[in-house]
Image: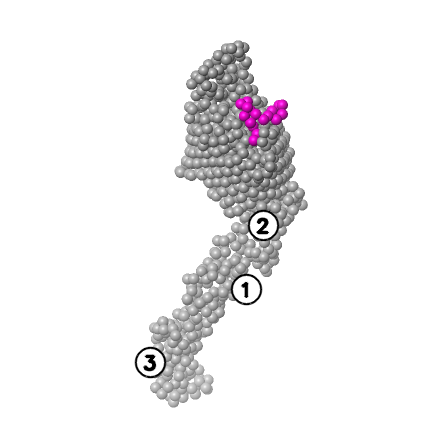
Amino acid sequence: GAVPAVATSAAPQLIATLAEDDDDAPAAAAAAEGDADAAAATEAEPQLISEVQITGLEEYKDLERLAWSVVQVRPNLAVTNEDVQEDANRLFDTGYFNSVSPVPEDTRDGVRLKYEITPYPVMKKVVVYGATEMPPNELQRVLNEHHGQMTNLNLFDVRKTVQDIDQWYMERGLFGQVHRGEGTAVEFVGDTLSVEVEEGIVRNVHVKFLDRETGNPVPGRTKLPVILRNVLTRPGKVYSLVTGQRDITRVQMMECSEDVNMIPSHANENSSEIDLTLNVTEKRTSDLNAGFGTCPSDFTHGFLSGLIGQLDFSQKNLGGRNQKLNGKMELGKRKHIFRLIHTDPWIEGDRYKTSRTVSIQKMFADSTLVHAPASPGNNAKADSASASASADGGAAQPSQASDPAAAAAATEPPKEARAASAAATGAVAAASSEGDPAAGGDAGGALASSAGNGGAADASGAAAVATVAGELGAASAAADSAAPVAEQPAGSPTKQAPTSKGFRIQREEAAVEFSRHIHPFWEGTLGLSFQRAGPRNSEGPCLEDEYGSPLTVSGRAFDDALVLKAEAVHSSDGHAQAVLSSEQSLPLPGMLSFTRLRMQGSRAFMWRDVTFSAFGQCGSVRGDLPPYDAFLMGGTNSVRGYDEGALGSGSRFAVGTVELQKTLPQPLQTMQGVVFADYGTDMGSGAEVLGDPAGKRGKPGTGYGYGVGLRVDSPLGPLRFEFAWNDKRRRKYHFGIGYRF
């Protein structure tokens, strides 16, 4: 209901009967004797006013002038009681005067009429009662237009004042308003405006678990403190719709929650206190999946090479504490992965909401991204064997020359063959989830990458990339036939290219990481990991490649490192992202010593219905660098137009990409056309990698690619079909699942 105005004004005082003189005796006698008619006639008789005075406004000259302009009784005029009363009413109706009292006085010259006037005080300050969220200065700002006005509620716009205060609470999503109950909500006390506000104070926050099917209350599996620590609304605070919605979102993001809502209710009818009920529907948190999958990039080595057997286990609410335990096993022809990750998304008692991830893993990954198997290209028989390499990915073995003398007399390959060899991308490059980020993965930190997101997603599933099957056999044969040949001095016998030694990289890692938000748009991660890696073949440890180059820095079967990692990720409006990462190995005896730095960033701009995207990344390693940890370039997630890792590998790298995307018109609105260009360089650092694997295999180290593509939205995620040319005028099809950046 409307706030009642407080009547603080006195009614006008009427003039008493004027003093009687000798001529008034008959009228007075008639009144005393009860002759009402005679008395009325006497009071209605005009009286001569000799003087008019206005008092009480000496300090308010403007109001004094206003009063004189309103008063119509003047000296030397004969007026009646009714005329004086009308003057008093006119003065009071101006709204500036709290009281008006006409006082007649007999004088020798006649009747002196004095108006005793008391003005309303001027409002000088505001006092708020019951407002804990709206400070007094905010209320003064709301009432600023009334500051300095007379404190007359008849003039004061009470309704607008109440609406302004209520609007302030509504705009901020707070439960609060001007008092609507009995009593006075807005009143003046002297020169002070007093306002009483009611706020909805939270009394209790209850959590109720509901059945997924029936919606009936059921016992919950999640511990109440784990849920309530995500709720910022606390008893004793004013209930905020904005904070309540954020609370719902935070609880909804918990792995154990399927549906969440919050219902406020009055604690009792006579109180403004509020009880909140948080309704939580839990989801199934345990999963065990087994089956077969594919790694499209491995199809470059044959159909069977791309098949992977998978076994995944996950518990997303371990012990009712919203902690996650993930186990993963992948078995394939070219790689094996065993991984176990435990994540606590909020360490108990930590006020910064720091998460902790502990992980261990063991994996076997193919080495062809760096050490592509080389094939001899200096005799026709070897070329024939290489060109006829089977589609199952088996590297063609060099045929032995039946005539050693003829082999010794073989001449140096022509210049055109050497040029083709230098342009070759090596033998078939298999995309591996453990590759370096320059080629779409992370050779040295796949565990850390998967651990950073709780380990729920394996690095190999981040963006599956592959060469289109229609090109597989031809690409393999072309790469083998274009294998580099070590140049010999003029006139000397040509040395046969070494036979490829197939091997895989075995990695073992154990890591612990801590992550938290260090800024509204920045998340920081600090971790420590023990890493062990080394090449192995079917016979055991493999310490040299086919060129006799070492494969480990230590010269032992494995290289060990204890690595401290720091990473910062920036994400603002969803169209920009930046990642800064550093890894520093601890200088312990018998372990690798290196410093690795990486940076990457992306930005998207919209212009009408066209999206312009730019992406760049770079990195550098100082210190020990085994070949399997070099930065790789080339492939679907790097420089398109090249095979995976075929552009180069080095201790430094830089890759840049620009894309234009446009959604196709109906009925193809689920597709996007893409035009792109990529560039990558190892900055001349290929030879700094142990054994110079890129230089010995003829990888150019610098190159670019450009082309067109199609993006298709599907239940599996975005599918990418791309056709690219590189700077060597070679064409290549690419296929990928997921966004490139």
* Residue 271 visible: yes
Give percent across and percent down for residue 5. 48, 66
Determine the secondary structure under disc 3: loop
Real-space Cα separation, disc 1 to disc 2, in angstroms: 44 Å
Determine whether, in the image, residue 728 is placed left or right of residue 293.
Answer: left
Based on the displayed image, in which of its 4 quarters is residue 318 positioned? top right
Residue 268 at x, y percent in the picture: 61, 58
x, y percentage for residue 370? 52, 27
- Amino acid identity at mark 3: Pro
Most frequent secondary structure within the magenta stretch: loop
Reading the chain from its start, which is encountered first: label 2 or label 3? 3
What residue is at 42 percent from the left and 86 percent from the top? 28
Disc 2 residue type?
Answer: Arg
Type of amino acid at the residue the image marks with label 1 = Glu
Which residues fall within the magenta stretch?
A: 537-553
Q: Is residue 684 above or below residue 105?
A: above
> What x and y, as percent, mark residue 264?
58, 52
Dot 1 or dot 2, earlier in sequence: 1
Task: Specify whether residue 391 is painted magenta.
Answer: no
Q: Secondary structure at mark 1?
A: loop
Identify the residue at image location x=45%, y=23%.
423
Name the residue tied to disc 1.
Answer: 182
Q: CA distance from mark 2 to mark 3?
A: 82 Å
Mark 2 element type: loop
Residue 548 lies in the magenta stretch: yes
Label 3 and label 1: CA atoms lie apart by 50 Å
Point out which mark residue 351 bears.
2
Q: Is residue 96 above or below residue 489?
A: below
Q: Which residue is mark 3?
A: 75
Residue projecting furthest to the bottom: 22
Nearer to me, 135 or 652: 652
**Mark 3, residues whose alpha carbon is within 10 Å: few (<14), some, or many (≥20)?**
some
